């Protein structure tokens, strides 16, 4: 879809966009993940991480720095992603909603992982209820990946939009994790309904 000139003007004024360009991050969203990892320490050096909805790769860059050369990041998206040059990052073009998504990921990872994180988003229609339902559907699919592939005590982070299905989704996450946090990072746009749900300590 063509970007409008007001969208381009807003982007130029945005401090996180400018900072991302300065620091060489592919997206301003990188600052959301940096803040969440610094505050909650749910990913560390040497971790094995599955990242869902990775393109264009801002979060992937942050993950590669966080896990270091001894860790692994599997960056998954339906869209192709420009490769990163760190050897700890592998990318996989995959639709999270496909029937074989979990089994494909299990095969590629070859074992349990330390964290599953998801910034997956649908195309935004502008109709609040529809966008909310689609986002919760993708969050549920992300939870399914986490419940199938996390090691005991592993961590899960997923994006949601506020709306009527949120509390039932939160209960689903609560059942599988020792602790739950709801986070709105500072880099979130003021107009956005997005929040992140962090499940700490997978119970298996
Ligand atoms: C907000 S962007 C992610 C931005 C990323 N965190 C970054 O920092 O660069 C959301 C991504 O979710 C991906 N996505 C949407 N539906 C998906 C699906 N069913 N399976 C996999 N990826 C999907 C989109 O292609 C898009 O790249």
Image (tube, helix red, strand yellow):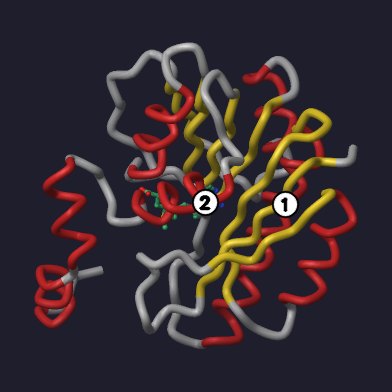
192 left or right of 197 in image: left
Image depth: mark 1 or mark 2 in front: 2
Residue at the front extreme? 39
Density class for disc 2 (Cα within 10 Å; few <14, some 14-19, many ≥20) is few
At mark 2, the secondary structure is helix
Density class for disc 1 (Cα within 10 Å; few <14, some 14-19, many ≥20) is many
Q: Residue at x 14, y 49 (%)?
A: 21
Q: Residue at x 53, y 87 (%)?
A: 128
User: Looking at the image, is 156 positioned above or below residue 148?
Assistant: below
State which quarter of the image contains the N terminus: bottom left
Q: Residue at x 18, y 77 (%)?
A: 7
Q: Position of residue 40 (x, y in %)?
A: 58, 48
**Considering only order in the chain, which callout, 2 or 1, is on the residue closer to the N terminus?**
2
Depth check: give the residue in front, 198 or 3: 198
User: Looking at the image, is 151 positioned above or below residue 141?
Assistant: above
Q: Residue at x 44, y 34 (%)?
A: 63
At mark 1, the secondary structure is strand
Q: Tag on residue 199?
A: 1
Residue picked out by circle 2: 39
Q: Position of residue 67 (x, y in %)?
A: 48, 25
Q: Position of residue 194 (x, y in %)?
A: 51, 72
130 left or right of 113 in image: left
């Amino acid at each position: 879809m063509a970007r409008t000139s007001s969208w381009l003007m807003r982007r130029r004024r945005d401090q996180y966009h400018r900072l991302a360009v300065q620091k060489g991050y592919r997206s301003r969203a990188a600052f959301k993940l940096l803040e969440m990892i610094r505050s909650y320490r749910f990913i560390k050096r040497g971790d094995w991480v599955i990242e869902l909805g990775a393109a264009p790769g801002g979060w992937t860059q942050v993950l590669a720095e966080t896990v270091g050369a001894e860790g692994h990041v599997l960056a998954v998206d339906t869209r192709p992603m420009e490769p990163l040059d760190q050897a700890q990052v592998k990318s996989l073009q995959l639709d999270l909603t496909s029937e074989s998504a979990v089994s494909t990921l299990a095969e590629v990872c070859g074992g349990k992982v330390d964290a599953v994180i998801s910034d997956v988003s649908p195309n935004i229609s502008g109709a609040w209820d529809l966008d909310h339902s689609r986002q919760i559907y993708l969050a549920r699919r992300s939870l399914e990946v986490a419940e199938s592939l996390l090691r005991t005590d592993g961590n899960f982070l997923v994006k949601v939009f506020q709306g009527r299905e949120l509390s039932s989704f939160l209960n689903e996450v609560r059942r599988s994790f020792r602790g739950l946090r709801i986070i709105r990072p500072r880099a979130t746009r003021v107009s956005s309904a997005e929040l992140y749900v962090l499940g700490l300590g997978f119970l298996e």
